[in-house]
Image (tube, rainbow, N blue to C red):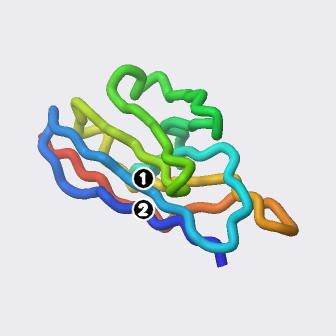
């Protein structure tokens, strides 16, 4: 069974940094695009950043220059380095990945990790 497990969330003061990790496990043949989304209370889930398996990245305008997405293909892991955090970055952060199994492909999601930025 494929699983995505996030870690690294927590409480941080405005201006601080956090690094999120998300590791995929299971009968994985290969992984395509990976990404991070976030959902604040009362709001829709929104894209934060994505990265292809070749390392090409895409960011939401609100986090460009502040957040950095990266991945370690050998470890099936994606990271999100978040700097200069603001209270409006408070949300549950979810990782996602397009995972190719030996007989099918699917988009998988992690369980989410809470990030809270205090002012």
At a point 54% along the width and 53% down the height, the residue shown is 74
| Drawn side of residue 42 relative to residue 31, left or right | left
Residue denoted by label 1: 93
At a point 87% along the width and 68% down the height, the residue shown is 103
Viewer-side label of 1, 2: 2
Check if mark 1's residue and mark 2's residue have beta carbons within 8 Å. yes
At a point 42% along the width and 22% down the height, the residue shown is 64
Tell me residue 115's x, y (percent).
Answer: 29, 53
At a point 16% along the width and 48% down the height, the residue shown is 12
What's the mark number on residue 48? none
Tell me residue 108's x, y (percent).
Answer: 65, 61
Residue denoted by label 2: 6
Tell me residue 62's x, y (percent).
Answer: 41, 26
Q: Decide: is 60 above or below 20.
A: above
- In this orientation, does residue 37 appear? no
Tell me residue 41's x, y (percent).
Answer: 39, 54
Measure the C-alpha gap from mark 1 to mark 2: 9 Å
- Tell me the quarter of the picture where residue 1 sits: bottom right
Of 11 and 29, nearer the camera is 29
Q: Secondary structure at mark 2?
A: strand
For marks 1 and 2, the one nearer the N-term is 2
| Drawn side of residue 14 relative to residue 102, left or right | left
Q: Secondary structure at mark 1?
A: strand
């Amino acid at each position: 069974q494929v699983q995505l497990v996030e870690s690294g969330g927590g409480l941080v003061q405005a201006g601080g940094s956090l690094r999120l990790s998300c590791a995929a496990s299971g009968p994985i043949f290969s992984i395509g695009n990976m990404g991070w989304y976030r959902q604040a209370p009362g709001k829709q889930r929104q894209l934060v950043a994505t990265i292809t398996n070749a390392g090409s990245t895409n960011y939401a305008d609100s986090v460009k220059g502040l957040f950095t997405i990266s991945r370690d293909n050998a470890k099936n892991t994606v990271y999100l380095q978040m700097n200069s955090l603001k209270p409006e970055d408070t949300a549950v952060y979810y990782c996602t990945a397009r995972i190719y199994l030996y007989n099918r492909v699917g988009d998988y999601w992690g369980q989410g990790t809470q990030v809270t930025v205090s002012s």
